[in-house]
Each structure stands twice: as structure tokens, then as C-alpha cells.
Amino acid sequence: MSLWVDKHRPRDLMKLDYHKDQALRLKNLVQQSDFPHLLVYGPSGAGKKTRIMCLLRELYGSGAERLRQETMHFTTPSNKKIEIMTVSSNYHIEVNPTDVGIHDRVVIMDLVKNVAQTHQIDSSGQREFKVVILNEVDDLTKDAQHALRRTMEKYVTTCRLILIANSISRVIPAIRSRCLTIRVPAPTETEIASVLHAVCKKEGLSLPSELAMRIAKCADRNLRRALLMCESCKVQQYPFTPDQKVPEPDWQIYIRDTASLALSEQSPKKLGEVRQKLYELIIHGIPPDIIFAGLLKELVRNCDMAMKCQVANHAAQFEHRMRLGNKPIFHLEAFVAKFMAIYKKFVEESLGDAF
Amino acid sequence: MQAFLKTGKISSADKPSSSGVKSVKKKPPAPWVEKYRPKTIDDIVDQTEVVQVLRECLAGGDLPHLLFYGPPGTGKTSAILAAARQLFGDITRDRVLELNASDERGIQVIRDKVKSFSQLTVSSTRPDGRPCPPYKLVILDEADSMTTAAQAALRRTMEKETRTTRFCLICNYVSRIIPPITSRCSKFRFKPLARENVIKRLRDVCEAEGVDVGDGEILHEAVDTCEGDLRRALTALQCCQRLIGKITSDGLIEVTGLVPQKLTDEYLGIKNYSELEIFVENFLMEAYSASQLLEQLSATVVNAGHLTNKQKCVISEKVAVCSYRLLDGGAEVMQLTDLGCTIIMANNDP
Ligand SMILES: Nc1ncnc2c1ncn2[C@@H]1O[C@H](COP(=O)(O)OP(=O)(O)OP(=O)(O)O)[C@@H](O)[C@H]1O
Ligand SMILES: [Mg+2]
């Protein structure tokens, strides 16, 4: 049995639940075959992938939905063998080049050139080009992004790229200039709630509006998360009640605990405990930038404006360093230590004032 | 091999041989940027200096080593490709070696492939007897991504084979090219294109495509959104036309990924931290780009009447820092919060 997220994924552009205008426009766009490469961006869980799969179906018909998984092999210039998972149909292929880390350029180069140099056999003359979908382009190395530039121009008639990113801040301008950028905002809480209602209706369940709204609130405008939460609510207790407990992701609670640890006492001993917790979070695969954002949010809560400003400044600085280095724990810990120092000084000063 | 890749490999073997009549090959549809890529150097908009030099070469003058640099979409690649085609015509294939960032361009390739290509001597006549330039051309496009080691290896070859080969390097940032190479080339900066010229070009394309632009007022807005990048302007126009069915200013903002001015002003006017937290969260959820915001913010701050010089200084300096960190990979939420704090402090301390 598949999860609701997969089971009730819309498959037709016109059946998408929100941003309907955009869906209609996309439909117009692909009527003619002369559209440029696409760069689709938006926060995770905003429904980028669903939209793209619908677009493919619009382009090629249901043939684009017969997917197979394959592993492809590449050889780097230094003769290292690498392999990568791909998902493809007769019309498109999808890869996640960041899976191979710094060798992403090789994958992109070989793959795109290969695809571009083969052409569509389809005799019904459906489309003259194939589609290559690249995930997480904002995390590609600069080298890989550069490798896309001329390739994108040269092979545009036989191969269209659909690039997916969370944000375009890290996509180089030369690539942005070559694409139609399509922004997919996260659904609002109301939109999420109405999707939840629709899904429950299809499942034959009745969902109280209060509960739907509460789930939507907890989900941080991430539709995937909302659906997963809703499904686990169902597992916990059905029939639903408006005030039943909505399971919150563990890691959010955990980050909050970590922050209150740092607030409770500022000493090397506490820092050691905080480090344990940070390690725990990292080991469980919580992305370090999320940890950073969560910590900042919790830590500044009781600070005055001047101090908030200082703390935010350091958070930004340490997070940036973390991107350049390769051990997230150092920078997370450095940030917490810095915070403790600032906070302790503040507390001592205000105590001093009191006497 | 992948089944996906196997379908319909282009091979010369299965070309229809029996039928005497050859159907005219229909060109598959391409986006406007490719459809209207300049075919000759006379089609190049602006960039008069370069065009002048290239024109002299076409008239039989000697071609120096070239270094083109400038922002995306200003005609660098188009210029050299058009010139090469005009110089060499149907022997372009033998005379021109084009390597771009998607090709392997490590030290080894420079030493082997480029070197042996440059060493070949060529005659000054074509196979059919007509004259042609007595040299070959190596185009190194997107040279910013070449390693310094590879560039150093190139240096010798450039020097030794001037008799038979000219080099043309193209990049966005000239600072990424090592000085020994820049000093061997005639450098040409491709400026962002001038407004009038972009507008004229856009008008021509729209006419050719049968797009209604009214009195052309909307084209001015199209130019504003693209900062002298003609490729971006063309893409924006085409997408707006295809997506919405006509060119509108909101449509242009949407397809170019700009941040609505309203949001920029809101960010600049934030007065306390909780407002900031909400703003940043919504901004990112709406999937606007932080780097784009900073770019527009910087223009807004400089021209803002309500800020004192001191405030402008403080904010601008922080914009610079945050924008650098963003490009380096820093998280958007952190940088926007940090900058936002500076803005709050500045707003409360005129
Ligand atoms: N000066 C120009 N004259 C005419 N068309 C231009 C000019 N500049 C850009 N264009 C249009 O923009 C498209 C892209 O230009 P081109 O490939 O030359 O950019 P580039 O300078 O090489 O950019 P990049 O740095 O991203 O490689 C061309 O196909 C053409 O349609
Ligand atoms: Mg170029």
C-alpha cells in the first residue's frame, strides 16, 4: 500500500490543487515546442516535482509515466569509476547529480551530451526533443554549472533541461539567463487544509476543519509533511477528533531542547552537553543549516534588540563558514559558545545594574 | 547501455538511400534566443569596438589573439561564432576548435589536443582555390572555469604558434584569467547593451514573431528587468507571450524572477525583530530569491529619500557582506535575518 503522498498525487496539470493560474500558463507554454529550458524553484514540499511530472505528461502523454530505474556508470578524467541512479521514461531522464559529490560535472557533461546527440524516434512526430531533469541544481559545484552553459545553448533543439532548485540564489547568473525561471511558492495554510480535506474525502474519511487547520499550521507550509502528518494522525486515532494530538517532528522538539540547554547555564560543562545533542541531530541526518536556523530562532527569544542583532550576526557568519569548511559540528558549536559568552555577559551586566 | 539512450541514435547508416527526392529538412523549433542569434557580425547589437576589429579581419586584416569579457547575454559567444563562420565559411570545421566549459580542458588536453591542433600549418587557399585566412582559430569559451594550471600550459602554446593559430578566450570575469594570458590578447569588454539598442532589437524580433507590443512602452519595462542582458530580455518576452498570451509588466516581473518593489520597500522599513522573522519566513516560502532582493535593495537604498547618509552607509555595507556570503553558499534565511537586524538598528537610529 502506498502512502497518501504518492497515491493522491495529481497527474494532470489541470487537476493541480493550487497555483491554478500557473498550471494553466504552463499548459499554454508547452503547446508550442519552442519554449526555452526551465528552472523551477521553490521551497521543499511546494510541489515542484508534481508540477513537472504533470508537465511531462502534457508534453508526451501517458508514456512519460512509464518509469524505470537504472544505474548509469561514468568514468572521471582521473579514471575513477562512479555510478548514479537515474529514473527515466522513453522521453525523459532524471538524475540527481549531487549524489556523486564533486564529480557532478562528469555526470552532467556525459549525460546531457549523450541525450542531446540521440534524437526522438517517435514517428508520430510528437516532440523533437527529449527532456533531462536535474535535481538540486543549487547544490551543484560551480564547475558543473559552468559545464551546463554552452551545452544548454548548443543542444537546445534536441534536448530541453528542467532544472530544479530550492532557491536560485546559488545558481550562477549565466544559467539563470538561459532559462525561464518558474517560481513555485509554498502552498498557504488554507491551501494545505483544503488539500487535506480533498485527500481524506478520497480515502472516505471525515476530517474536522479544526484538525486540518492545526496540521496545516504545524507543517511549515510543506504539503508533503502535512500529508504525512495527517496520515499518521489517522493511524494514531480514527475517527478524528478536532483536538487530537498532531505529531510534531522529533527533531524540532530536539532542537528546542538543545537551545534551552544553552539558555539554562553558560559553562564549558553545558557546552559539552550541547555538543552531544548537536552530534545526535547531525547523525540523524538533520541538515546543519536547519539546525542553525532552529537554534537562532529559539536562542534570540529572550534577548533585547541589540543582542538579537549580535547573535544573528554571528549566526550568519558561522553558518557561512560552515559552508566553506567540511565539519558542521565545529561551526555549530562555535556559534553556541559565542552565544553563551554574549548571553552570560548580558546577564551579569544586568545583575550588576540591579545592585 | 541505457535503453533510454539507445532509442534512435543518429547514425548515418540508416539514412534513406532509395528515395531520390530528398525532403527539405525542417528545422526543429528553437527558442527565440537561438532563432535570432546573430548570423553575421553586422547583426551584433552594440559592441562597436569589437565589431570594428572583426570587420577589419574579414576585410583581410590580421587577427590578434582576442579576449572577450563581460556579463552574460551580451553577445560574446555570438560575436566570435559569427566571425568564424564568415572567415572560414564551409571549412569552419577544419579551421576552428571550439572548447567550452563542458569539454575536458585540463592541463593534459591543453598540452595534447590544443597543442597539436595549433601546430598544423594551413594554406591560405581553400580546397576550391578561393583565398582564406592563413591561420586557424581556437575558441576557449567560458574560460573562467579553466584552472590556472591549464591556463599556464596554454601560455606557451599561444606564444609559439602565433604563426598558425589565433586564440579567442571568452569569460565573464576577466580577473579569473592569469595576467600572462591577458597581456597577450587584445581585450574587449562587452558592456551591458544600451537601452535604445536593446529596444530596437526586441522590436524587430517581436515584429518578426507577430507579437503585439502596442506603442512599445512595455519594451522599456522589459529592458528594465534585464539589466542589459539581451538573452534574458528575449527569453522573458517569449515566455511572457507564451505563458500569458500577451506582454504585461506583471508577467515580465514574474518570468524574470524579480522581487516586487513592494516587498523590497517592506523589508527596508522593518522596525522590530518579530516583524523581521515573519517577513523572512514568508519571503522564502514565496520562493523569492534573496540574492535578487539584495541586488534590488542596494539600488533602492542608494536612491531612498527617507534615509540619512549614515543609514545608507551602514545598510549598504551590510548588503555587500551578506551578498558575498550568499554567493559563497550561505543560507538565505541567515543572511536575510542578519541584514534585517542591521536595517532595524539603522531605522531606529537615524
Ligand atoms: N550584442 C548582441 N547582438 C545581438 N544579439 C545578442 C547580443 N547579445 C546577446 N544577444 C542574444 O542573446 C543570445 C545569447 O548571446 P551570447 O551567447 O552571445 O551571450 P554570451 O555573451 O556568450 O553570454 P555568456 O556569458 O552567458 O556565455 C544570442 O543568441 C542573441 O540572441
Ligand atoms: Mg557564451
Image: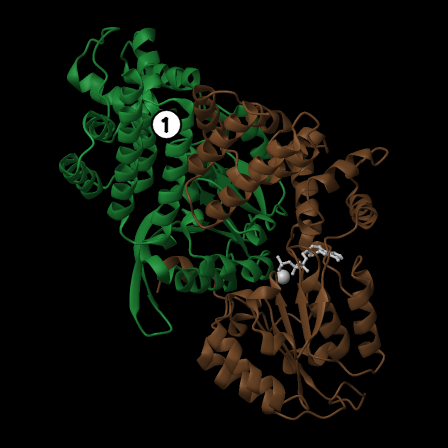
Chain colours: A green, B brown
Could you say which is closer to the camera, residue B266 or residue B158? B266
Could you say which is closer to the camera, residue B345 or residue A229? B345
Q: Can you identify the residue that label 1 sits on?
A: A222
- Residue A151: name its quadrant: bottom right
Residue at image position (28%, 18%) is: A203
Label 1 beta carbon less than 8 Å to ligand 1: no
Residue B7: tell me if it is visible.
no
Please indicate whether residue B332 sits to the left or right of residue B231 in the image: left
Amino acid found under the numbered disc labelled 1 = Asn
Please tell me whether residue B117 is drawn above or below residue A239 in the rendered image.
below
Q: Position of residue B254 (x, y in %)?
A: 61, 33
| Dot 1 alpha-carbon crowd within 10 angstroms: few under 14, some 14 to 19, many 20 or more | many
Please indicate whether residue A271 sits to the left or right of residue B21 in the image: left
Q: Quadrant of the N terminus of chain B?
A: bottom left
Using the image, name the chain to which the residue with label 1 belongs: A
Q: Position of residue B279 (x, y in %)?
A: 48, 24
